Image (cartoon, rainbow, N blue to C red):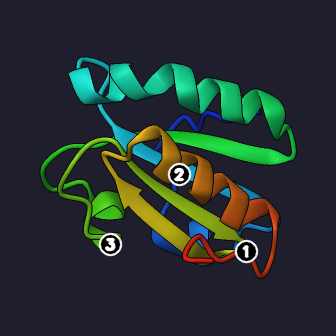
Amino acid sequence: MSTSFDREPTRDEVDQMKGLVLLEFGASWCGHCQATAPKRDALLDAHPEIIHIPIEDGPGRPLGRSFRVKLWPTFVFLRDGEVICQVSRPDPDELREGFAALVNPGFDPAD
């Protein structure tokens, strides 16, 4: 489920979010973001319990800087406001592992 805000949430608001949340930092014109979208959409369809919050990022945007975002897309996987993992420009396996880590407590992609 994608959620849109009329404004970018603050870091405090993100830290207080309950449940499974995926923050996605990027830009609509970003080729890397567009290339990742089909895999992201398929994984979101398979996990409707995850709240997806796309964030239009750019220089000086405080939420992206608070997560040290430098590349797009950057995915931040949160459970009850706690970062489970964060990946930038992930390949399909890295993206799938991020989703698995989020929905399966104790999942370790290194295993």
Q: CA distance from mark 3 to mark 2?
A: 12 Å
Circle nearer the viewer, 3 or 1: 1
Give the left or right position of residue 100, taking residue 98 as reference.
right
Kind of residue at badge 2? Leu
Quarter of the figure with residue 57: top left
Which disc, if any, is residue 66?
A: 3
Image spot of residue 21 (x, y percent):
68, 56
Q: What is the secondary structure assignment of the residue under circle 2?
A: strand
Question: Counting other residues with Cα less than 10 Å from the Cα at mark 1, is it few (<14), some (14-19), or many (20 or more)?
Answer: some
Residue highlighted by disc 1: 107
Which residue is at the far right?
49
Residue at x 69% of width, y 35% of height: 43
Q: Is residue 58 left or right of residue 93?
A: left
Give the residue type at disc 1: Phe
Residue 44 on image: x %, y %: 71, 34
Q: Residues within 10 Å of mark 2 (few under 14, many from 20)?
A: some
Alpha carbon of mark 2 to alpha carbon of mark 1: how far? Answer: 20 Å
Residue 74 appears in the rendering: yes
Q: Nearer the viewer, mark 3 or mark 2?
A: 2
Q: Which residue is mark 2?
A: 23
Residue 72 percent location from the top left of the image = 26, 42
Which residue type does callout 3 highlight? Ser
> In the image, residue 92 lies at what x, y percent?
48, 39
